[in-house]
Amino acid sequence: MTTTQIQITSRSAEETRALGKKLGLCLTSGMILALTGDLGSGKTTFIQGLAKGLEVSENYHITSPTYTLINEYPGRVPLYHVDLYRLEHSDDFENIGLYEIIDNNNNIVAIEWADRMTGEIFSEYLTLHLDIADDETRIISIKAYGPRADNLANALKNRLKE
């Protein structure tokens, strides 16, 4: 069941990072973020800001884990940054340990190309879809699924007013 929905227009990579940071400041452990959007839409840029909000050290360079598949960053809450672009089958997800990471309620899991996962895998999560409007502008649509995710989306709405 979808509850809270937010749509934001970002006019630069800096604004996309700032949105990620605001969400990161609201996050507590055990939340899953399912990111979708075309190549170059800003998914990794968003996660760079998310890492700042989770107080990941500036010593870590946040990059897409396209080839490593999963990057882990220590912060206020550990952040697992997952990229499913190169994976196609649910067996692959199990082989990389994705289900174990998702089941651990002590971290945040941000999954790029989450639409490659099929079925109802998560019970509490946010979806973030990034659409390319032009070279710099992105339309970011956020939907909450579950009560905790709904509370998170509302906390983000409040932080956006600041």
Image (tube, rainbow, N blue to C red):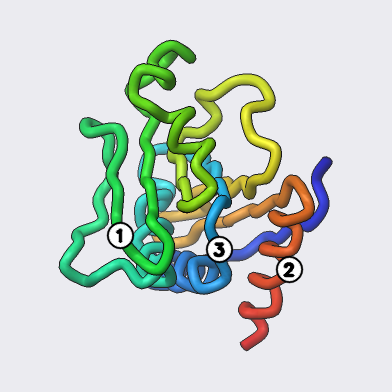
* Residue drawn 42% across the image and 19% down it: 94
The answer to whether marks 3 and 2 mark residues whose Cβ atoms lie closer than 8 Å is no
For marks 3 and 2 on the same chain, the one whose residue lies earlier in the sequence? 3
Q: Which residue is mark 2?
A: 154
Q: Is residue 66 above or below residue 108?
A: above
Residue 161 pos. (x, y %) = 67, 84
Tag 2: amino acid: Asn
> Badge 1, how many Cα within 10 Å: few under 14, some, many 20+?
some
Q: Is residue 2 above or below residue 45?
A: above
Residue 33 pos. (x, y %) = 54, 48
Q: Secondary structure at mark 1?
A: loop
The number of numbered badges drawn on the structure is 3
Q: Which mark is residue 74?
A: 1
Is residue 55 or residue 47 the one in the foreground? 55
* Residue drawn 74% across the image and 63% down it: 151
* 3D distance between C-alphas at marks 3 and 2: 14 Å
Is residue 16 or residue 95 the one in the foreground? 95
Tag 3: amino acid: Thr
Tag 1: amino acid: Pro
Is residue 22 or residue 149 the one in the foreground? 149
For marks 2 and 1 on the same chain, the one whose residue lies earlier in the sequence? 1
